[in-house]
Amino acid sequence: MKKLISVVLILSVVFFAAFAGGDSEKGAATAEAKTSTVSHIPTGAAPAEKVVITFWDSYSGDNHQCLVDCAAAFNASQDQFQVDVVYTSSILTKVLTSTKDDRPNLFNVSGNDSAQVISSRDWDDPIYIPAQEYIDYDNYDMTDIIANLATNYTREGNWQSLPWGNTATGYFYNLEILSAHGINVDDIKNYEDLYQVCKKLKAEGVENPIWIYIHQDWVNFGLTSEGLNYFNEDNGRAAVPTKALFDDHEVKEAVVAYFNWIKKMQAEGLCVDYNVSASDARNMFGQGDVAIYFGWASGYNPTYTVVSQGANFKFAYRPSLTFRNVPNKGQAAGGQSLFIGNTGNEWEEYGTWQFLKFMMSNEWDAAFAYTSGYLPIKKASFNIDIYKDYVNEKNPSAPVVAAAQEATAPGLGYALLPYSSNYGTIVKAIIKNLFADPAYTAEQAVADLQKQATEAIEDYWLQQGVVL
């Protein structure tokens, strides 16, 4: 890790001197000419003292340290801004109730929660400043960012926030166990295929064929792989949704298929007890006690640390499985979202953009991916030596997952909901009931999902003073 940091520090100083240093001068010398069209670009002379930028991040351990090291490299590379990285819990809750006086300059939230922050753009005091203002001002090239990531972080073609920590849903599998039973993962295209694999494993003596994650993302990504919108307003990309579409014929058929799959897996004893936690299931997988383990691509590093010495495992690298036997439309992208906080101080806001460009350099994108297990957000970052070595020695699935994302058209993605947390709680409770109650049918579960999602939508809009 120390070797990695020292290499990146050297490259980062070179990067900032060549790229961002000119922008600091640009902000002071030529910003005035553009203030008529870009309201948050600072005017006049830069402050005499260093401008302090506060970055709230929710990462821990090595991931947090990587961001601290990145900030230290940025601070050492120029003398106009100083970034302080502060670990902060419950960031979404705190920023939603923040004001300009106590708001951080930069913060991260999950991809699922980003829509709630973006919805504040209609407030009198928006929480954030759209990144597109600075992208336009600097003519910053966003084309190297993996194409489908734009689906989550843009509105009307304009970047609102920036991706950080790219991931996708899927599953890890023990290659030795599957190979010993004649199973080729490339033949698994949908959940029925996965059922047949687990049935074969169980019949041939594998006690625990699979552990199933109870989480909204597996519903969301499966529907996305079929190209289905399950909320109106283009799944929340055109506007905040006002209607759930789980009663739509195709959406209903797809979700019923997934819920019936869960019922079948439970009834036939093909899955680990649903009460087993994700961390315990990961440990079981690491010891070879589970053949297939649901997870995110970003969970590769923590999975790697618990796998028995010499065991051979991979992350399934194809697009997320479809619920039905239909053509797969592609792989949605997920991950974290970085927002520039609206603090009312143009130099702080502009300095935050300078740091974001520094963070998104290939070297630091690769360093964070190497450290965390997330995929890089940029295609060129896969060619940085430290990440190439990581792929070759540890995670050969990573570039193929990213290639599936890159091949997926922007616009194909999971629903962007400012009430995502409530929706996620609803999905989790319904799936747990499917596991727990043999009499609870998939059809009833989908009806409950439609009803409760509708109630969540109505509650959200009531809080905005709107009666649907």
Image: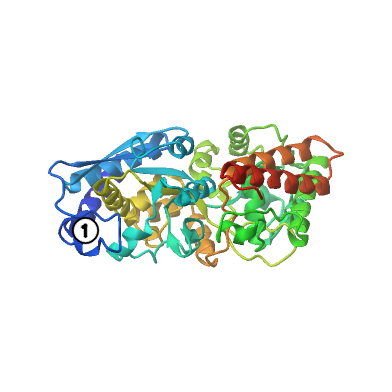
Residue 451 pos. (x, y %): 75, 46
Find residue 415 and report its image quarter: bottom right
Q: Is residue 109 visible?
A: yes
Find residue 317 and report its image quarter: bottom right
Q: Give left or right: position of 366 versus 268.
A: left
For numbered disc 1, what is the local secondary structure? helix
Q: Locate the N terminus by quadrant.
A: top left
422 and 21: which is toward the camera: 422
Residue 271 pos. (x, y %): 74, 41
Q: Which residue is mark 1?
A: 23
Q: Give left or right: position of 39 versus 232.
A: left
State whether residue 214 is above or below residue 400: above
168 and 143: which is toward the camera: 143
Residue 425 pos. (x, y %): 65, 39
Residue 299 pos. (x, y %): 52, 44
Circle 1 packing at 10 Å, graded few (<14), some (14-19), many (20+), is: some
Tell me the residue at 51%/56% (across/down).
152
Q: Is residue 204 visible?
A: no
343 and 312: which is toward the camera: 343
Three-letter amino acid code of the residue under disc 1: Asp
Q: How is the image coloured?
A: rainbow
Q: Give left or right: position of 187 versus 407.
A: right
Q: Give left or right: position of 322 versus 102.
A: right
